[in-house]
Image: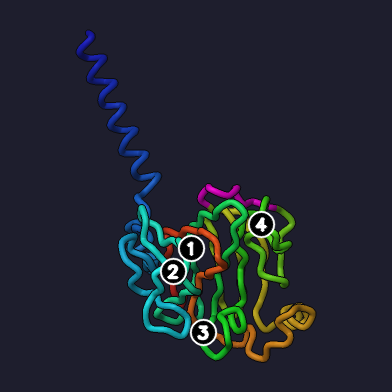
């Protein structure tokens, strides 16, 4: 009887372990379902392959790969961009921001400006509690903001997801829809005209460009960076 109970308990533990592994896949990997849907990893968890500094060919020494994360760890980092350009796409990244830290995620970045944010709209990444910028994490800088705050505190992993298409764009924080917008729409143009980006002729104009991770001088880690290109209709 005791042996049967032990075998049953052992089998239950194995089933639970298998379920947990399936529910919580290893970082920086793609499931079979994701592969079938067209998702691609932009970070392999081991190297900086697929990234380079803005207007450069390599990645600065301030970016380190540590414990399966791409980390802005020190001086000499600089903003980094994807080697490839994307037009319509879905993008997911997990970030862990330091106490008081600030960073950003930009899309449709071109190298015609003096900095990535001169052309690419920026989704704010920061510690909402102790950072000084009034633009909170997940907000589309000076343009769109949600009615809720779903960001976890500094030191915890957050997931940002964005959808960028000509018909509709959207941002999610930890699974919560933050806002939707259409680049180049009347509403978009009116908001840009009221922002600091109005002085930048190329801001938000590109329909294709690089994805950028910002160096704002603070410690920040990224992992599970993946993209799904979307074919034009």
Identify the residue at the far front of this view: 75
Q: Mark 4 — residue?
A: 131
Magenta-colored segment: predominant secondary structure: loop
Q: Which residues are magenta?
A: 149-157
Q: Are marks 2 and 1 in contact (CB under 8 Å)?
A: yes
Q: Earlier in the sequence, mark 4 or mark 2?
A: 4
Q: Are marks 4 and 3 in contact (CB under 8 Å)?
A: no
Residue that badge 1 annotates = 92
Number of the front mark, 4 or 3: 4
Residues tagged 2 and 3 counted as in contact (Cβ below 8 A): no
Which residue is disc 2 drawn over?
227
Separation (CA) of disc 4 from disc 2: 28 Å
Sequence-wise first label, 3 or 1? 1
Residue 180 in the image: above or below residue 109: above
Residue 222 within the magenta-colored segment of the rendering:
no
Q: Position of residue 179 (x, y in %)?
A: 67, 64
Q: Earlier in the sequence, mark 2 or mark 1?
A: 1
Q: Secondary structure at mark 3?
A: loop
First-in-chain label (2 vs 3): 3
């Amino acid at each position: 009887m005791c042996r049967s109970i032990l075998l049953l308990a052992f089998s239950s533990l194995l089933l639970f372990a298998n379920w947990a592994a399936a529910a919580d896949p290893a970082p920086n990997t793609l499931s079979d379902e994701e592969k079938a849907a067209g998702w691609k990893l932009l970070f392999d968890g081991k190297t900086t392959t697929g990234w380079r500094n803005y207007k450069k060919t390599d990645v600065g020494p301030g970016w380190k790969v540590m414990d399966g994360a791409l980390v802005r760890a020190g001086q000499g980092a600089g903003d980094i961009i994807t080697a490839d350009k994307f037009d319509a796409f879905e993008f997911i990244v997990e970030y862990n921001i330091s106490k008081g830290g600030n960073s950003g995620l930009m899309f449709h970045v071109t190298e015609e400006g003096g900095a990535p944010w001169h052309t690419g709209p920026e989704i704010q990444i920061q510690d909402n509690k102790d950072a000084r910028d009034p633009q909170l994490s997940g907000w589309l800088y000076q343009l769109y903001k949600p009615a809720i705050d779903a960001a976890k505190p500094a030191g915890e992993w957050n997931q940002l997801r964005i959808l960028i298409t000509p018909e509709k764009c959207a941002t999610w924080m930890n699974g919560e829809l933050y806002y939707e917008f259409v680049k180049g729409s009347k509403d978009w143009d009116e908001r840009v005209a009221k922002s600091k980006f109005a002085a930048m002729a190329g801001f938000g104009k590109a329909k294709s460009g690089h994805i950028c991770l910002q160096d704002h001088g603070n410690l920040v880690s990224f992992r599970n960076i993946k993209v799904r290109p979307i074919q034009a209709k």
